[in-house]
Image (spheres, rainbow, N blue to C red):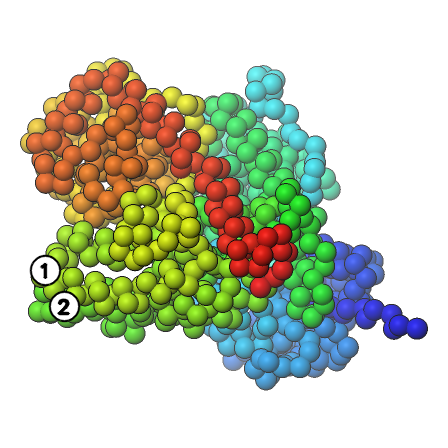
Amino acid sequence: MSAAPRRPGLLAVAGTGQVSGAERVLVRAVEAALAAGWRVVCAAPPGPLTERLAEAGAEVVALPELGLAAGSRPVALARTLARWARAARRLRRASRGLDVVLLNAWSALPAARLAWPRRRPHPAPAVAWLAHDVLTRPDRVQVFAACRGVLTRVLAVSEAVARPLRGDPPATVVHNGVPWPVEPAPDPLSADPDAPRVVGINALLSPWKGHRVLLEAAEHLPDDVVVEVMGGHLAKDGDYAASLRAIVEASPRLRERVRLLGHVADPLARMRTWTVAVSASTQPEACPLNVLEAMSIGVPVVASDHGGSPEVLAGSGVLVPPDDAPALAAALTDLLDDPARRAELARRGRDRVATAHRLDRQTDRLLAELARLAGLPDPPTPTSPHGRPPMRVLFVNENIGGHTTVHAHLRTAFVGHPEVQAEFLDVPAPSLARRVLGVRVPGLAGLDADLQPLRAQLALSAWVRRHLVARLDGIDVLHVYTGNAGLRSTSVIASMASVVSTDATNETNAYRLPSRPATRLTPATVRLTKRWERPVYEAATLVAPSTRWVADSLRQHYGVPDDKVRVMPFGIAAPEYGPGPAPGTGVPEDGRLPQLVFVGRSLERKGGLRLLRLHQEHLADLCELVLVTPEDPPAGRNVRVVRDVTVETGGVWPLLREAAVFAFPSVIDQAPNVVIEAQAAGLPVVGVRQGAMDEMVPPETGVLVEADDDAGLVAALRRLVDEPDLRARMGTAARQRFLHTYDIRVTVPALVAVLREAHDRHHGPGSGRRS
């Protein structure tokens, strides 16, 4: 007789016996493991958590509290170390015969380090940290740095959590999920107009959850708005809960409108009566369940713009600066007064949960990661709509300028994608060593003879080479953007299914950077650079330039054959607007001037100072110039500077929609994302003819001039300012170009097709093989 299959074992470790968001995630994971036939032991301080896990069928081992002890610093440190030592002994005993240890809190890291002091590789069990915290506090960062050696893998609940933890051990993102499907809240467009409007917050009463910010904002909400505060509190936060009651009682306005509900047995039922839900945390949330729950029932959310909230909402909610009561009040008021927008956000939120945050799917993903750590065969993989297993794709992100934006959109698009399980390797900001290696050499730099670009690229690609191999386990396809990140990894690129994407080549860049003018020595430096660059394209299964202009360079200058080239624009996610132009392209009301808008971090490099000068000399009486930039330009007549918004936070979209024309006279950008963003908003574009701009801005969508043609630039802007019908037609054409060419709903399927083609070329058609 054959032996019965071995029953896998899991030791789940919690730092507290209480139950909040992180513990709810752990409970669901343990229940799924038990249902899948795992033996589960839970080690945690006694409390409601251990009671719930015991009821579910887990064995329970009591631990001391793992957080920092009270008392003076020396006494607290001694008590804490003693607790960790006791916990370590119990963890070692409890883990015997088990395959995986899952730590559910940062406070469990020191006990695990003491329990298994040797660095990996160490004997079983594998140790994983299910990370629910965005590490910003220095003490927690230090704890992680001291304890990371014990970890086999980090399982992060969001990219915001994973980002500062990248390195050794590798980090994998498994987002939180919530039950789906669930009953939705009433449609905002069919709600009783006489019913009270309710703003609610569902969060444990803890100081960093931002209740005080909401109460301060509530002072400035319309008179008919009710504010509900739902959630209990831990014993240690009793004083904070009392302080909230005192704030409400001290204000006649708040006494009339604020309801402190405490713990509610059925929170979703209560939330369905809300008009808007708030997550006002003053510290970064990881992957907030309260936000996901509101999205699941179709209640629009206003959340603090940090941590995992932007990642979770992904355009289906409103973001405001953290700890900013006036901004929160303004956002709530605008949303309360706009039922159509609330209905649209409600629809997007439910769609987002259905595709990316279903509890059953996310729990299955977590369990699959644990099974992999236990050395078990991969569980049966759900097939995509095309009957193929989803591909695991590692995206190597050069993380420079617009490349960061591209990968931010890809992260959002691939959450819960049925055909691609995406992982990301992000190159960090340059270290001191990388900065030294990439420094310009006085004298030689002016001759273009110091090889500074190549040295910087080699230093960056050396970092990629060191970290890439450790991330390839189970990866089906490698995507590298741009080829410069792969200069030192050609053997890896050649060994597996791979796609190298790029928005430029070093050949094209060498002659187009104003900060580094070409000289008679430039051809020689380009030839040397291409000796490193060409092998990357030769090694790749497919090469995916973002424009035809780059494709021509790859064929002409690098000899990349046509059958390897796939022109593939990278798109963006944009708000849902109609097919027509931006409202600002019409005739301004109340005698206001039409607006020119410019967006750019560097005014000098992006042409903003040139635009400001020409506006003051020729156009200041005809239009207002809006400069969206973090810099401080010189003051000017009919000039407005907006410093505190970005596309990433969503704040720039209203500015684009209010404008009549988008002006971007940059001479260094060859395929700028910001032009796509302007087209998405329905704006005509006025820019400089260079790089791929002719391809991006065809004549029906805007006007391009030569790089040094000030008169032509002024004439193009003046004509569009003077002719509202023309700018409206161009704005409509620009919007249509975005929808058909650059909308991420169009570009991601094209990218998936290229990734699948690379996979099939390398492994053979129809293969489901993992690399």
Residue pointed to by mark 1: 519
Quick one: 453 or 760, which is closer to the camera?
760
Question: Disc 1 marks which amino acid?
Answer: Thr
Residue at 41% in and 41% down: 571
Residue at 69% in and 62% down: 378
Quick one: 419 or 337, which is closer to the camera?
419
Which badge, 1 or 2, comes first in the chain's sequence?
Answer: 2
Give the percent coordinates (x, y) of residue 632: 19, 45
Displayed quadrant of residue 76 = bottom right
Whether residue 52 is situated above or below residue 705 in the rendered picture: below
Q: Are marks 1 and 2 in contact (CB under 8 Å)?
A: yes
Q: Is residue 338 left or right of residue 88?
A: left
Does residue 637 show up?
no
Residue pointed to by mark 2: 449
Question: Disc 2 marks which amino acid?
Answer: Ala
For the residue labelled by badge 1, is the local secondary structure a helix, a strand or a loop?
loop
Q: Is residue 651 left or right of residue 122?
A: left
| Mark 1: few/some/many CA within 10 Å (<14, 14-19, 20+) | some
Quick one: 63 or 654, which is closer to the camera?
654
- Please, which residue is most extreme toward the bottom here? 118
Whether residue 248 is situated above or below residue 726 in the rendered picture: below
